[in-house]
């Protein structure tokens, strides 16, 4: 099933600034729409359900028509057909396999993969401020393995 949409897929390690770039892109055009992903992780104090994520239970995931899905840090993240905006540009933050998964749904020529690159020490500071020392360092270390060997040839790389 091919859907008619363009998807800008923003990828990068935790704390790299993915959400920052997503908001900048959305402000740059009224024609672009945020593709709100779902997650089973707990909602953070500053997040709004339906704006930042659709916060759902693991049982609710079973009822979705899933476009792409991944497990990160023991939580499920993904997007569903119900949330894709057809006939416009969708923007979302996703995991490393997001561009490939969306290419299967909307066609490779309709996927624009963007990788957000930032200095490691900037990420560590952001993660510790956001998640606390222990959790921030854990996320930083886990990301080393998740992004090791990622081929950036097909990505537009933005420095942050």
Image: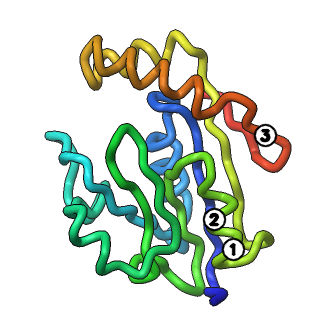
Q: CA distance from mark 3 to mark 1?
A: 19 Å
Determine the residue positioned at 73% across, 72% down: 110
Does dot 1 land on a helix, a strand or a loop?
helix
- Whether 7 is drawn above or below 156: the answer is below
**Which residue is farthest right?**
153
Residue 50 lies in quadrant: bottom left
Residue drawn at (19%, 46%), measured in percent from left and top? 42
**Residue 152 circle label:** 3
Badge 1, how many Cα within 10 Å: few under 14, some, many 20+? Answer: some
| Mark 1 to mark 2 CA distance (whole Å) | 5 Å
- Dot 3, crowdedness within 10 Å: few (<14), some or many (≥20)? few
Tag of residue 104:
1
Residue drawn at (41%, 25%), measured in percent from left and top? 139
> Residue 5 lies in what quarter of the image?
bottom right
Q: In which quadrant of the rendered image does the N terminus lie? A: bottom right
Secondary structure category for the residue under label 2: helix
Residue 11 image offset from top left, x and y in percent: 59, 45
The C terminus lies in quadrant: top right
Look at 69% across and 74% down and name the residue there. 104
Question: Along the polypeptide, which appears first: circle 3 or circle 1?
Answer: 1
Label 3, secondary structure: give it.
helix
Q: Is residue 35 above or below residue 73?
A: below
In the image shown, does 159 or 137 lie closer to the viewer?
Answer: 137
The answer to whether marks 1 and 2 mark residues whose Cβ atoms lie closer than 8 Å is yes
Q: Which label is found at residue 101? A: 2
Mark 3 vs mark 2, foreground winner is 2
């Amino acid at each position: 099933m091919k859907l008619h949409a363009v998807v800008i897929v923003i990828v990068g390690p935790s704390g790299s600034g993915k959400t920052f770039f997503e908001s900048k892109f959305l402000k740059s055009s009224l024609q672009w729409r945020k593709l709100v992903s779902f997650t089973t992780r707990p909602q953070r104090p500053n997040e709004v359900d339906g704006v930042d994520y659709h916060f759902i239970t693991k049982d609710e995931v079973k009822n979705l028509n899933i476009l792409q899905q991944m497990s990160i840090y023991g939580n499920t993240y993904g997007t569903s057909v119900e949330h894709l905006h057809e006939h416009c540009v969708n923007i979302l933050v996703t995991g490393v396999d997001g561009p490939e998964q969306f290419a299967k749904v909307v066609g490779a020529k309709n996927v624009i993969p963007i990788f957000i690159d930032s200095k490691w020490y900037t990420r560590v500071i952001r993660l510790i401020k956001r998640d606390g020392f222990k959790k921030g360092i854990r996320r930083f270390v886990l990301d080393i393995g998740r992004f090791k060997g990622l081929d950036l040839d097909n990505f537009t790389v933005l420095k942050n």
